[in-house]
């Protein structure tokens, strides 16, 4: 919104400083600051309102230290995060950009699912919340919209040489001339169901390779595989963030760290010089995602002001489902989804701990007549709580691990 306003001003009025708004770095910084202001200043008002309306957390007795002290803490604080993402994004990003529109859709759609889940828990006094099947269907629909948009929207393209596009069988949409020094290089913008991945020749992986055993039919079936992949990543990361949101500040901090990795990916993928240097796809117009990711990071850090130990508010499913879904979608859009297990390693570990615990318990109960456990409790952070570790120390160590994983993910940009 501000971009269009100041672009108009710059064209018709000689206003000093108006040209700054054409720079992504300036708008990203403004969006980050604005997001922090909204989450910190208005967050306090929202928390007071939630407390006044007695929208508090109902805690099940799991035998965890300090658990009962959290009873009544305001929940549904994810509203603060959503406000701090959406409002600055509407102001600072270009709203004619397909990637921005897609990210806003994912944010609002998953917010609605999480809000309904929390509403049923808090106001209907149903601890189960929204039915698991209903929640899953909502996430699948979201993943389907993301996949179809990336597959068929005319604004979703990658830039590569014509020989590369022809060899891979990609649909060439337009030809462009790119100036490199004193030379002009002919390139094309194409649609491709492929992604960047380290450790592979050319730093590129085409999804059709997974179906090469099908012969000529592989090309027709690749879109189906891509849709399933997008849904799997979105649902897994979204639910992983939900499971991680079990102790004060954990999911918020881990999400903000993942956001830092994603903002690096967004910047280099949207910059032709850096993309060429690193041997990754240059994705035209994806630079605007730097601004959206700045809003995301600012919202997480601002919410952490109130969510760090001891938490004044919990985000609930309203926030956690949205955080995971946004991270997953950003990774998919930037064609870095195969790096998700690295920079979202905490979400992956939390997910796996639950799957392993439940599977092993069922297996041993069937075999021995008595269920046995791998962990004292799952998700994994509760295992450490049961072991006597203070939750603040658990959160700090998970944050350190998340930083370590994010750095590894960023380093892979140079590994070919």
Image (cartoon, rainbow, N blue to C red):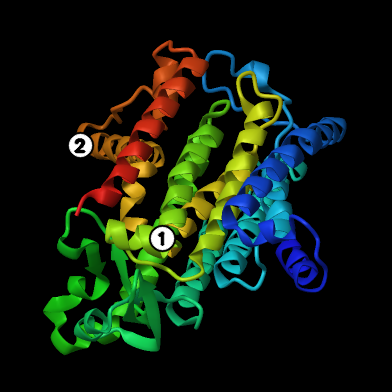
Q: State which tag comes first along the sequence, 1 or 2.
A: 1
Q: Residue at x 58, y 57 (%)?
A: 24
Q: Position of residue 196 (x, y in %)?
A: 29, 61
Q: Residue furthest top?
A: 388
Q: Secondary structure at mark 1?
A: helix
Q: Position of residue 42 (x, y in %)?
A: 80, 38
Q: Is residue 335 visible?
A: no
Using residue 339 as the reference point, say whether residue 259 is left or right of it: right
Mark 2 neighbour density, 10 Å: few (under 14) some (14–19) many (20 or more): few
Q: Residue at x 28, y 28 (%)?
A: 374
Question: Mark 1 sits on what residue?
Answer: 269
Q: Between 240 and 9, which is closer to the camera in this rendering?
A: 9
Q: Secondary structure at mark 2?
A: helix
Q: Residue at x 34, y 87 (%)?
A: 171
Question: Mark 2 sits on what residue?
Answer: 367
Residue 178: image quadrant is bottom left
């Amino acid at each position: 919104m501000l971009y269009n306003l100041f672009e108009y001003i710059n064209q018709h009025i000689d206003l000093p400083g108006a040209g700054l708004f054409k720079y992504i770095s300036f708008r990203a910084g403004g969006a980050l600051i604005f997001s922090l202001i909204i989450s910190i200043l208005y967050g306090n008002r929202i928390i007071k309102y939630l407390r006044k309306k007695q929208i508090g957390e109902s805690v099940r007795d799991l035998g965890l230290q300090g658990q009962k002290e959290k009873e009544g803490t305001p929940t549904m604080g994810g509203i603060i995060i959503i406000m701090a993402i959406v409002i600055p994004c509407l102001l600072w990003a270009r709203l004619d950009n397909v990637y921005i529109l897609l990210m806003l859709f994912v944010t609002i759609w998953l917010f609605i699912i999480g809000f309904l889940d929390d509403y049923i828990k808090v106001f209907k006094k149903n601890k189960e919340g929204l039915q698991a099947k209903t929640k899953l269907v909502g996430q699948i629909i979201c993943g389907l919209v993301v996949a179809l948009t990336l597959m068929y929207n005319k604004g979703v393209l990658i830039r590569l040489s014509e020989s590369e596009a022809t060899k891979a069988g990609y649909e060439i949409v337009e030809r462009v001339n790119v100036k490199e020094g004193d030379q002009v290089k002919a390139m094309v913008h194409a649609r491709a169901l492929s992604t960047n991945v380290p450790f592979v020749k050319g730093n590129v992986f085409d999804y059709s390779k997974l179906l090469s055993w099908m012969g000529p039919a592989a090309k027709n079936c690749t879109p189906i595989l891509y849709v399933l992949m997008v849904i799997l990543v979105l649902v897994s990361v979204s639910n992983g963030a939900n499971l991680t949101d079990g102790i004060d500040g954990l999911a918020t901090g881990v999400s903000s760290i993942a956001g830092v990795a994603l903002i690096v990916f967004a910047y280099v993928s949207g910059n032709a010089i850096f993309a060429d240097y690193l041997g990754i796809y240059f994705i035209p117009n994806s630079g605007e995602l730097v601004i959206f990711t700045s809003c995301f990071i600012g919202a997480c850090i601002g919410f952490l002001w109130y969510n760090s130990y001891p938490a004044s508010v919990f985000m609930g499913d309203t926030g956690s489902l949205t955080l995971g879904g946004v991270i997953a979608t950003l990774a998919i859009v930037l064609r870095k989804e195969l790096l998700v297990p690295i920079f979202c390693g905490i979400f992956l570990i939390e997910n796996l701990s639950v799957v392993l615990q439940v599977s092993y318990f069922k297996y041993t109960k069937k075999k021995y007549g008595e269920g046995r456990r791998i962990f004292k409790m799952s998700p994994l952070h509760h295992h450490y709580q049961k072991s006597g570790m203070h939750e603040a120390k658990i959160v700090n160590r998970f944050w350190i691990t998340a930083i370590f994983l994010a750095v590894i993910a960023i380093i892979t940009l140079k590994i070919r």
